[in-house]
Amino acid sequence: MNRAPFRFALLPIQLALAWFALSPQAPAACLQSCAGDTTLFGESALMNNTCGGNTAFRGLALFANTSGYVNTAVGDAALLGNTTGIPNTAVEADALEVNHTGV
């Protein structure tokens, strides 16, 4: 049995794997900041923030926050609607999503 055709059939796959392994890696775009006493990490986290003392991790966390302070949001859309509430802590996606002025 001649195995030559099988050897050449795998060559394109091997070349493709080598190409991907050796190509440069593109970094993911993720917004992050540590300005003063405010920390954020995530797409649109603390997007409207005007006050300090807040921490937001994940996308849209504390998105609507304007003058609320000492808030912590961990999870997608956690404390999404918070505008002036102080001090709140939300952990998990959508936690306290509709909390606006809670104290």
Image (cartoon, grey):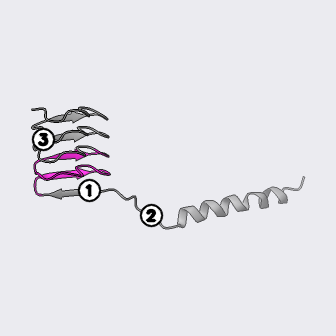
- Residue visible at 9% across and 38% down? 86
The type of residue carrying mark 2 is Ala
Choose mark 2 or mark 1, whichever is in front: 1
Q: Is residue 53 above or below residue 35?
A: above
Nearer-N-terminus badge (2/1): 2
**Real-space CA distance between mark 3 and mark 1, rounded to the nearest whole angstrom:** 22 Å
- Residue visible at 23% across and 32% down? 96
Instruction: Look at the image and give the residue range highlighted in magenta.
Output: 36-60
Main secondary structure found in the magenta portion: loop
- Residue visible at 11% across and 51% down? 51
Q: What residue does disc 1 label?
A: 32
The type of residue carrying mark 1 is Gln
Q: Which secondary structure lies at badge 1?
A: strand
How many numbered marks appear? 3
The type of residue carrying mark 3 is Thr
Q: Which secondary structure lies at badge 2?
A: loop
**Real-space CA distance between mark 2 and mark 1, rounded to the nearest whole angstrom:** 17 Å
The answer to which quarter of the image holds residue 6 is: bottom right
The answer to which quarter of the image holds residue 12 is: bottom right
Q: What crowding class fits label 2: few (fewer than 14 Cα within 10 Å), some (14-19), or many (20 or more)?
A: few
Q: Is residue 40 magenta?
A: yes
Residue contact at pointers 3 and 1, CB within 8 angstroms: no
Disc number for residue 26: 2
Q: What crowding class fits label 3: few (fewer than 14 Cα within 10 Å), some (14-19), or many (20 or more)?
A: some
Nearer-N-terminus badge (3/1): 1
Q: What residue does disc 3 label?
A: 84
Left or right relative to 10: residue 77: left
Q: Is residue 13 above or below residue 79?
A: below
Left or right relative to 79: residue 85: left
